[in-house]
Each structure stands twice: as structure tokens, then as C-alpha cells.
């Protein structure tokens, strides 16, 4: 039994295709979400359907696998049963890959409604709604200060998601909406990227951070490093840099400063006695199982695996996929009566995109930036999409959007 | 000033492109919705972004036009001012094209939450959610009667929307989901189409109704004509045929039995003294203006124009577009000091699709059905899409889906 059809879970399930197992894949949602492209939905370039694939469909030809749309709520480790909404299910081996769930507001959970994070399809359409509505309201606003607040966008956190959102917003303001308004000039928007550390993309090598920062400023994004948001309400944010605190009126604040772990982690820790790290992740053994529970594997964002470098592996899709494939191999080794070797992650590199023709990539000591990095980024992401669901159409849409600088999915839906 | 960026409003606005006017287009939404394809979103074949175009974008190169996202709430005909949410706006000439808004439940408005209609993007994603969730729940359900209720879909009303929904549901059950489930066989679904008159597509010639009914039954749809829904709750529906009333357990009921007019109609009638018809539409003169108010044009679903045949024109996209173009010509004629000739609608025919290769079309005395009608339907709809927003991608997606029998946008999003 496998909980979570994200990158880790789905790769584990697919790698078990020919294994003599009876596999049930459980997910709260009926689709696998290609999260690295979620910011493209939030900024109107892609539609939700283009970055999500029904789990059932992806696994439909895999006869040893059934898919349940269900919420895993608790676990009975003695009886090896998982409690779901409306029922129980028993397992011999359990793979937990629930991912991370809620945003992490550093003790300010009341900020959540004012500063949505980007984790789900619903988050993405909500952010899209707020961005587009801000321009609409600015167009109708007659008070100059209010208009300025509508045209001020603050993004908190300059990791890959924050950088991608800021870059896309820069393109929207400078390019996409150029001819669309009569009372305002979208190019006069203020896009502020607030980061606590001393540089954007802190997990990347410093030279690439510098390149990304230069690319961002070319798109009109103002980067404030060594800064933090100390207050946040519907009128704007207070940003502290050193000892100075600046109050910035802004109607649109987006949160990209970190995600929390799935709530399932705490429950599993309680039931198994497994240790949690500071971030709420389950600390796993060299074979990704919980101590004393070789039948429970934990992979992806919920797992803290530090046996390789002493530091936990990052919450990246590539890590989760490698862990998923490892677990599938380990399960098959056990079925043959063998002991699986410990997990080892081979770092394939990291990528982040800033905008059209602008990206940074680190492959060990090889650092790329500019159009070449962007094409690598495009190629890697498209390959995953095509591998999953034969999404050639997204490729075509991308080429089309690239040529026409189009963002066709600019819809304000849902909402108040 | 123009209210409503549906087919009528947008065609009027575009036809005024080179006119010496100062045009403001007001719509509550930021996008024009291609409503004839809304059922494709509701059934997971297309994404919302593919059938909606930002109004601003469509009109961005039209320098005499500004677009406001605003809700028209009242009208002051003396001072020629329109009351919007947050402000007023004055007009010399007003074109009202707000369309129809809410579903018409024939006095049973309490049925609305149990039987959503198909009018907005949000309706479409809600219907999609319900259809897909029904199959998901059936897969997990152990009680046979409950499982049957999850696999029973009732569509109320067999006009074009009801027929299109029923046909698409037939394809989903028989084709799309064929390999996706383990506990249920989607082909065992019951799809019931309930119609009050004696045939499906009552606005079409009888021979085409018969063809459509045959196509529907080939897709596994059970058609009940001369029947009406007398009760509806979360457990199912009561369907009366003659004197017999049958109680049918069903978890998914969709409403396609009619739409009501925009609420703006009643307000305008109150303020201008213009007569409303039984359905709540404003009765317009031969030039589509309100009696005594030559400065107010009403077009599209809100207008009752009966000067041509004695019967009001139907609420079709083609009618609204012709009215929009007429109004643009009439306004320009007046600016030249001429009196515009009365409006005349040239009926280009009607089309409805049932499914892949299945459609019916009536062009005067020429009646088409089968693959030829389907290709005509496809061609006509694609031409509109391409004309509006150069949506070649939808064409490509369609061809792709046609070849692969795919419905890629099968996402359960949003929620209770």
C-alpha cells in the first residue's frame, strides 16, 4: 500500500509494475500534480489540466495496482491497518509519500489568508485571480495611492518558487499586459522579492544567485535580501532590513517562504515512536524505513534522510523520484529474500527559471545561465511531462507561447 | 457604453472598432466565455483556459475601447448613468447584453445545490468534480445499492446542453474510463436523460430529434420523454411519466432544463417602463431599442425580439452575434444622421453534437446527421474560436483527443 501520488509515490508505483505485489495507491486528489510548473498556472501561462494527470489514468494499464481517492488519517501499526475517511485498509508493506502540505508562516498562521502560498491547483488559481484582479482594480481606481498599492506585488521568499513567480510577474507587467489597459501602465508595477538570507536562490551556488538577481532586475523585480516581513495585513507589509523597517502598501502578497510537512508525519511518529526533525519530517534509516518498522518506508518531502552527507536531502522532485525507485527495488529484493543495499542519491543537479530565456542550472561544478540553462530547464521539464502522460500538447503550447509571448489562461475564476 | 462581453456584446464592440466613438465595455468577469463548449469542460475534455479569452486581450488593439471589470447594478435613465459596484459611469448610448444568468428551476430553487446547471466556468468545474467523484466513490463503495446510485447520472432537460452532456457522459463511461477502475465497470453506469416534451432537441426538426435519440441510445443513454422531475434530493430523483412516478436513486443530477434572464432585466424594466415577457426578457422594438429610449439597445438572451416571425428569436450565440453587429451598424448610421433600418435575422441554422462523429444540423430544409454533421459542427465552432483569439491550440488538442479518445482534464478540484 502506498500513500501519496506525488513524484515519489508515482515513481515507486510505476517501478512496481511487473512486481508480484498487490498495490493500492491512495491519494486525496484524483490527479498527480506536476508541481514544478504550478507557478505557470498561477501566472496564467498554463491551465491546471495541462500540469495534472489523473492518477488512475497514469496507472490504468498496471493490472497489479488499484487507485483509491481517499484521505489517510491514522495508522494502526500493530494490526497494520491504515485508517481512511470512511473505512480501513490493511497492508503488509506501507510506503508513505504524502509530500508537504501547508505553507509554513513561521508562527504567523493568521497571515495565510492575506498571503497565499503555492502548493495546490486551488492555490495557483487563487494567486492567478489575485494578480489579475489587482490590475483590473488599478485600472478602475481613481485614487493615486490606492492605485499604487494595487500595482505593488510582494513575494516573500526567494527560493525557486519565489524567483519563478517574481520573474513571471515581471514578464506579465512588462510584456503580456502591455497593450491591455488605458488608465494604468502595467510597466509601472512594483514587484518586490523579499529574502531573509543574503542572496536569491540560497540553495544554488553564489555565482548563479548573482546571475539570477541580475536577470530579475532586468525584468523590473526589486530584490531585497537580508530582509524579513515583520507585519502583514490587507493594506500591505512591513519589511525589516537590518534595523530599518519600511511599511510598503501592497494589495497582493504571495508567500513562497517555505512549506510545512504533511500532518501525517506527526501521527506516524506518535504511533511508531519514530523521531521527527525540527521541520516535522520523519527521520528514516539508511533503507528509508522507520526504526523498528521495516515494513514502513517514508519517501519524499516527509522523509529526512541524512545518511549520505550528514545533511538531510532537499525536498526536490528528483530526490523523491530516486527514493520512489529505490523503494520499489527494495521491496522486490525482499520478495526474493535479499537484503536491499542502503539508499544512495546521485545528485543530478538543480535548475530554476527566471523567465523567457533566463534560467540558472548547477550540475556539480558545471554552472549554466542564460538561454542555454533555460533550454536545459525546458527540456528536463518537458521530458518529465512527456514521460508521465505523453503531454506533447504542453510542448506545442510552450512553443506557441514562446513565439507569441502569450499567456492565454488569464482567467479570474472562483473567489469571494 | 456596453454591458456584457458575451457573444452579442463582444461582436458589437468589435464592429465598432473604427467608429468615432468612445466605448467602455463592462463585464463582471475578465473573460469572454465560449459557452457552446462549456460542456466539454464539464466533461474533462477541455480546460477552462481553452474556452475563455480575456476580454481585455481580445479588445487590446482597439484604441477607442476601454474595458472595466465591474458589475452593473442599476441604471439612472434620466441622468444617463449606470451604477456599478464602487462608482458610476455615464453614457450617451447604452448597449445591454448581460446574457442570461441563473438556472431556472421552475419554482424549485432549493434544488439548485443538488442539481447544478451549466452556465459558468465554476459550474463546469463543479459538474466535472461531481461526475468524476461519483466514479471514485463507486470504486470504494462496498454496498451494491449505494454503488449503483453513484453510477446513476440523471440529466434534466434534453435541449442541446442536456444532449451534449448526456452524450459526453456516455463516452466517458464507455470509453474514457474503460481501463481505469478495478471494482466497478464504468460501462454499467446508468445515464438518464429526462425531457418534458415528446422528443429530445425539441427546437430541431423531428427527424433530427429521432436521429439524436438513436445516437444517444447507442452511447448507452436512456431517454425519457414526456417526463418530468417531481422531486429531487441528495438520494435521487422522482420522475413522473404520465401518471406513473418512479423514484430513481442517483447521486449525480445535472440541470439542463433552462436558464433565467439576467437580473438586470427587471431593474431596467422598472426604470424605463419597458415591458418584460413571461420569461423575464425585455421586449425590444424593431431596432432593438427600448420603447421611448432610443439610446438603450438590448441584445442577446435578455432581448425578446419578435418583429420578424411573431415569435421571439431563440437565445442562441448566432442571434446575439447578429444583434451585436446590427447595433454597431445602427450606432454608426445615427452618427451619420441616418435612421437605421430595422433588425433582420438571417437564420444560419442550428447545430448540436451528441459525441464523437455524432451530431445533427439543420440549415433551413437541409438536415444533416452523423459524421458529416459532426464535422460541420467542429468546423463552425473552431472557426469562432480561431476568429476570437487565434486558438489554433484548441484545434490541435481536438485533433489529438479525437485520435487518442483522450479526456486529459479529468481533475477533481475545488470542493464542497
Image (cartoon, coloured by chain):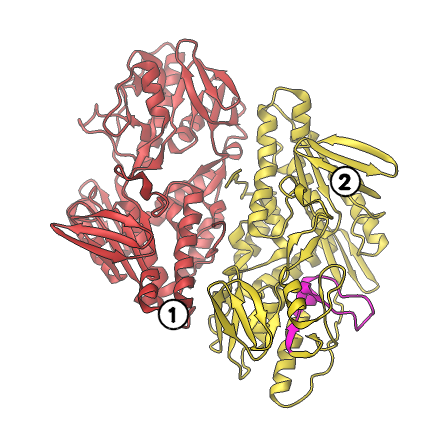
Chain colours: A red, B yellow
Question: Pointers 1 and 2 in contact (CB under 8 A)?
Answer: no
Residue A135 position by quadrant: bottom left
Q: Residue at x 40, y 43 (%)?
A: A383
Q: Toward the viewer: B102 or A8?
A: B102
Place of residue B384 in the rendered image (x, y in percent of width and height, measured from the top left): 61, 63
The spot of residue A72 in percent (x, y) is 44, 24
Please tell me whether mark 2 sits on a helix, a strand or a loop.
strand
Give me the chain letter of mark 1: A
Relative side of B394 to A254, left or right: right
* Disc number placed over residue A142 in the picture, else none: 1
Q: Which residues are magenta?
A: B295-321
Q: Which corner quadrant of the image does residue B144 belong to?
A: top right
Q: Nearer the viewer, residue B140 or B371?
A: B140
For the question of whether residue B268 can be seen, the reply is yes
Is residue B218 visible in this depiction of the protein? no
Location of residue A51 with respect to B311 vertically, above or below: above
Q: Which residue is mark 2?
A: B229
- At x 26% / y 29%, what residue is drawn? A345
Asked if badges 1 and 2 are on one and the same chain, I answer no
Confirm whether the magenta stretch covers residue B308: yes
Provide residue B156's location: percent of width, then percent of height.
73, 43
Amino acid at each position: 500500500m502506498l500513500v501519496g501520488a506525488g513524484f515519489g509515490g508515482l515513481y515507486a508505483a510505476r517501478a512496481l509494475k511487473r512486481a508480484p505485489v498487490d498495490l493500492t495507491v491512495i491519494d486525496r486528489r484524483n490527479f498527480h500534480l506536476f508541481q514544478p510548473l504550478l507557478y505557470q498556472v498561477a501566472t496564467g501561462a498554463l491551465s491546471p489540466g495541462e500540469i495534472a494527470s489523473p492518477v488512475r489514468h497514469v496507472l490504468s494499464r498496471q493490472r497489479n495496482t488499484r487507485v483509491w481517492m481517499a484521505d489517510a488519517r491514522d495508522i494502526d501499526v500493530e494490526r497494520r491497518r491504515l485508517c481512511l475517511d470512511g473505512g480501513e485498509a490493511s497492508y503488509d508493506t506501507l510506503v508513505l509519500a504524502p509530500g508537504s502540505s501547508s505553507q509554513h508562516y513561521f508562527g504567523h498562521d493568521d497571515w495565510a489568508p492575506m498571503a497565499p502560498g503555492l502548493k495546490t491547483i486551488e492555490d495557483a488559481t487563487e494567486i492567478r485571480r489575485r494578480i489579475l484582479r489587482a490590475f483590473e482594480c488599478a485600472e478602475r481606481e481613481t485614487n493615486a495611492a490606492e492605485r499604487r498599492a494595487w500595482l505593488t506585488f510582494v513575494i516573500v521568499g526567494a527560493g525557486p518558487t519565489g524567483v519563478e513567480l517574481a520573474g513571471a510577474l515581471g514578464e506579465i507587467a512588462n510584456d503580456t499586459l502591455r497593450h491591455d489597459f488605458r488608465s494604468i501602465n502595467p510597466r509601472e508595477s512594483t514587484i518586490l522579492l523579499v529574502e531573509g538570507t543574503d542572496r536569491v536562490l540560497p540553495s544554488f551556488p553564489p555565482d548563479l544567485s548573482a546571475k539570477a538577481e541580475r536577470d530579475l532586475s532586468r525584468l523590473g523585480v526589486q530584490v531585497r535580501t537580508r530582509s524579513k516581513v515583520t507585519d502583514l495585513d490587507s493594506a500591505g507589509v512591513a519589511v525589516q532590513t537590518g534595523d530599518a523597517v519600511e511599511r510598503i502598501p501592497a494589495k497582493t502578497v504571495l508567500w513562497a517562504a517555505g512549506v510545512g510537512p504533511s500532518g501525517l508525519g506527526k501521527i506516524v511518529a506518535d504511533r511508531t515512536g519514530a523521531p521527527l526533525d525540527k521541520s516535522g519530517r520523519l527521520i528514516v534509516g539508511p533503507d528509508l524505513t522507520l526504526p523498528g518498522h521495516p515494513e514502513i518506508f517514508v519517501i519524499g518531502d516527509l522523509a529526512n534522510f541524512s545518511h549520505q552527507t550528514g545533511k538531510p536531502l532537499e525536498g526536490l522532485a528528483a530526490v523523491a523520484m530516486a527514493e520512489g525507485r529505490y523503494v520499489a527495488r527494495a521491496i522486490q529484493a525482499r520478495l526474493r529474500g535479499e537484503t536491499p543495499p542502503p539508499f544512495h542519491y546521485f545528485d543530478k543537479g538543480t535548475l530554476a527559471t527566471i523567465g523567457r530565456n533566463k534560467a540558472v542550472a548547477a550540475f556539480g561544478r558545471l554552472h549554466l545561465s542564460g538561454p542555454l540553462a533555460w533550454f536545459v530547464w525546458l527540456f528536463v521539464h518537458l521530458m518529465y511531462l512527456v514521460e508521465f502522460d505523453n503531454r506533447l500538447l504542453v510542448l506545442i503550447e510552450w512553443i506557441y507561447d514562446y513565439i507569441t509571448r502569450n499567456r492565454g489562461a488569464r482567467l479570474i475564476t472562483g473567489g469571494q
